[in-house]
């Protein structure tokens, strides 16, 4: 029995529902699998239905995972996701667009797509789902930002600015929701080996960045997912408004 002032610091998420956007690949899928292994019912989203169904099928031994299709760049789709996922206790804003392009070459359409996906989609999903968390006096939101939100990379202007916006929202949301018992934090990954990054930037893109970091290697998705699950869980019960940099020392070394 818990005494006055004591808290559970376990990783037992039984009875909790989690929503992981972009949970059908890479970092999001690794986080969804860890959350499911801890006992949470996990909804994962993505645009590609086949990919989503394959991801859930491949993770069935980890626990309870469901796929709900949604496009975070589309406001109607985000509203539909808010309704279909139902009330959640844990929200991981992970889906992201990460194209490269020099500022002088950027098209307005691409600029909008990145901000619509990485910022607007997360913003209105939080607006839809946080009232339930506040009502129950408990909840955890984890935003997946990037090393690029904290450090300059030529050719990543729009992406970096969108992730810096999400880092800023982390602080504002933490301030707005703290009194209601809802914690909001960010995980800022460094270069991580995922399907999406390999497809967009190739093997060399991430490896080149990794060479300049303290630990001089890329991360596996699982290494980022560990920090996401920690922040989502009661083990991080006194942490809000902050960022865990999972980046081989990239932001400071
Ligand atoms: N990998 C890295 O080096 C790295 C470093 C720093 C930060 N990050 C961040 O980590 C997050 C995950 O990246 P990842 O490397 O794991 O990517 P990934 O392997 O490409 O996975 C991306 C996931 O997001 C979904 N997604 C993409 N656009 C979406 C949209 N408009 N609406 C809904 N879902 C969408 C994808 O599914 P569909 O394609 O089917 O929609 C997929 O499930 C991103 O926010 C990224 O910016 C990654």
Image (cartoon, grey):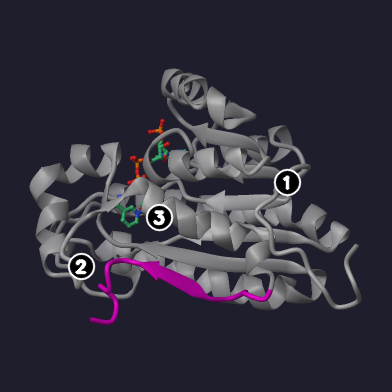
Whether the residue carrying mark 3 lies under 8 Å from ligand 1 is answered with yes
Q: Which mark is residue 132?
A: none
Q: Going 47% across and 55% down the picture, which residue do you hit?
A: 226
Ligand 1 located in image quadrant? top left
Q: Which residue is mark 2?
A: 215
Where is residue 51 drawn, in percent x and y? 41, 23
Whether the residue carrying mark 2 lies under 8 Å from ligand 1 is answered with no
Q: Which residue is mark 1?
A: 88
Q: Looking at the image, is 103 positioned above or below residue 22? A: below
Which residue sits furthest front? Answer: 1
Give the spatial CA distance, label 3 vs label 2.
15 Å
Where is residue 212 drawn, in percent x and y? 12, 69
Marks 3,2: beta carbons within 8 A: no
Q: Looking at the image, is 51 positioned above or below residue 30? A: above
Callout 3 secondary element: helix
Nearer the camera: disc 1 or disc 2: 2
Q: In the figure, residue 188 lies in which quadrant?
A: bottom left
Whether the residue carrying mark 1 lies under 8 Å from ligand 1 is answered with no
Placement of the N terminus among the 4 image quadrants: bottom right
Callout 2 secondary element: loop
In depth, the one of 57 and 88 nearer the eye is 57
Q: Which residue is mark 3?
A: 224
Report the span colored magenta. 238-253
Instruction: Check disc 2: other Cα within 10 Å, few if <14, some if 14-19, many if 20+.
Output: some
Where is residue 47 drawn, in percent x and y? 45, 30
Of label 1 and label 2, which has the lower sequence position?
Answer: 1
Of label 1 and label 3, which has the lower sequence position?
Answer: 1
- Residue 243: say if magenta: yes
Q: Going 49% across and 38% down the picture, which residue do you hit?
A: 23
Instruction: Check disc 3: other Cα within 10 Å, few if <14, some if 14-19, many if 20+.
Output: many
Q: Looking at the image, is 237 positioned above or below residue 121? A: below
């Amino acid at each position: 029995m818990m005494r006055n002032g004591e808290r559970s610091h376990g990783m037992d998420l039984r009875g909790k529902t989690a929503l992981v956007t972009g949970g059908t690949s890479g970092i999001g899928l690794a986080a969804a699998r860890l959350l499911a292994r801890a006992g949470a019912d996990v909804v994962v989203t993505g645009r590609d239905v086949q990919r989503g169904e394959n991801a859930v099928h491949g993770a069935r031994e980890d626990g309870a995972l469901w796929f709900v299709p949604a496009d975070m760049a589309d406001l109607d789709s985000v509203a539909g996701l808010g309704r279909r996922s139902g009330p959640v206790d844990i929200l991981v804003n992970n889906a992201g667009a990460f194209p490269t392009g020099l500022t002088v070459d950027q098209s307005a359409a691409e600029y909008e797509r990145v901000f619509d996906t990485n910022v607007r989609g997360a913003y209105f999903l939080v607006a839809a789902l946080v009232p339930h968390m506040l009502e129950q006096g408990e909840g955890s939101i984890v935003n997946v930002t990037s090393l690029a939100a904290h450090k300059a990379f030529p050719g990543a202007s729009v992406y970096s600015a969108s992730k810096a916006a999400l880092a800023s929202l982390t602080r504002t949301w933490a301030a707005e929701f703290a009194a209601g018992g809802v914690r909001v934090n960010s995980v800022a990954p460094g270069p991580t080996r995922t399907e999406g990054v390999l497809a967009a930037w190739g093997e060399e893109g991430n490896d080149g960045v990794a060479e300049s970091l303290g630990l001089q290697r890329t991360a596996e998705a699982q290494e980022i997912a560990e920090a996401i699950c920690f922040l989502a869980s009661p083990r991080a019960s006194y942490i809000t408004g902050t960022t865990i940099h999972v980046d081989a020392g990239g932001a400071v070394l």
